[in-house]
Amino acid sequence: MKLIRTEDAVGSVLCHDITQIIPGVVKDAVFRKGHVVTEEDIPVLLSVGKEHLYVWEKQEGMLHENDAAEVLRQVCQGEYMKASEAKEGKIELTAEEDGLLKIDRDKLNAVNAMGQMVLASRHGDFPVKKGDKIVGMRVVPLVIEEEKMNRVKEICGDEPVFRILPFRKMKAGIVATGSEVYHGRIEDKFTPVVKEKLEECGVEVMGYVLCDDDAEMTTGAIADWIDKGADMVVCTGGMSVDPDDRTPLAIRNAADEVVTYGAPVLPGAMFMLAYKKRENIDADTKDTEAESKADIPIIGLPGCVMYSKRTIFDLVLPRIVAGEHLSGDDFSVLGEGGLCLNCNVCTYPNCGFGK
């Protein structure tokens, strides 16, 4: 830090805020710490009585807060994100595409554990829309050791801390089960709810079929939707342990992989997810994401999805539409935050459910 004449400060970086006081009108910083002085700023600085300024003097092995913030941006920013201009050691990333936010939590925590810098983000594994704020980052001191920022680069490696997986265009078929619905004894009120939730995620609903409480019939209906080009099949009803509830068996018979029958989420404990391998996929494909797109999710929804505002389906569906192939581990960690409080006014996803 050095003291210079204000007229000589063009291009220099302020080491402190410059406050303007007009009695009864304003008392605020006219220039903030870290501001780069321009020719146009000189008259303003002189008008607030600043004939001399403390400015940052570049030192070997030290980085200015804005330069250090740019390092944070480089390790954090993935595709489909836009960065703000570095200002006072701060940069924000916003989404440029609708999709699912993915966060490398190990890297996030490691950077925050280093001190003198912060990354504060929204929760990962939740949908974001274009324009949504993803993360704010800040370097705390005005100057920071360059070696420390090099360590950040080493910790984070080549893959960004934050990624957005754009939602895919998918088609879904619905299989509504239950003898009471199949025989017309009651109205099917489940399908409209599922249809609305699918369309919320941009999924095209191909239609629905009704099935009796017959496992073979339901398995056949699932296979028919897949033959017609469905990228996802959603089955409703028949998911409990009652003797007439045979949807889990039907899903097992239709699938190549069963991920889970049951999840630590309320409402939604009797949820089921399985996958059917899509035929005619290039056998040489090794990319994990491409493989996940090749697998067709078969979902079994418990009755709570029909009457509860938010359930396990709301937590899982965006991840499926974003192309994730979920595993048992993805479900086992849902217990903390897995209890919906059924608030009178639902504010999801701006609440603790699923987090």
Image: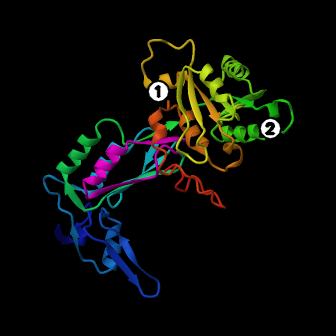
Which three-letter amino acid code belongs to the residue tagged 2? Asp
Instruction: Spot the residue most to the bottom.
Output: 23
- Is residue 202 in sight in this rendering? yes
Q: Which residue is mark 1?
A: 289
Q: Secondary structure at mark 2?
A: loop
Q: Secondary structure at mark 1?
A: helix
Q: Is residue 241 left or right of residue 82?
A: right
Pointer 1 or 2: first along the chain:
2
- Residue 101 lies in the magenta stretch: yes
Q: Specify start and end residues of the magenta stretch as a single range.
A: 98-126
Q: Is residue 314 left or right of residue 242?
A: left
Q: Residues within 10 Å of mark 2 (few under 14, many from 20)?
A: some
Residue lying at 21% horizontally and 45% vertically, measured from the top left: 151
- The answer to whether residue 282 is above or below residue 115 is above
Q: Is residue 53 left or right of residue 222?
A: left
- Residue 340 lies in the magenta stretch: no
Residue lying at 72% horizontally and 42% vertically, measured from the top left: 193
**Marks 1 and 2: which is nearer the front?**
2
Which three-letter amino acid code belongs to the residue tagged 1? Glu
Front in this rendered view, residue 294 or 273: 273
Between the C-alphas of marks 1 and 2, the distance is 36 Å
In percent of width and height, residue 182 lies at 82, 30
Front in this rendered view, residue 281 or 254: 254
| Picture quarter with the N terminus | bottom left
- The answer to whether residue 319 is above or below residue 224 is below
Q: Which residue is mark 2?
A: 188
Q: Is residue 105 left or right of residue 316?
A: left
In percent of width and height, residue 242 lies at 69, 35
Front in this rendered view, residue 243 or 71: 243
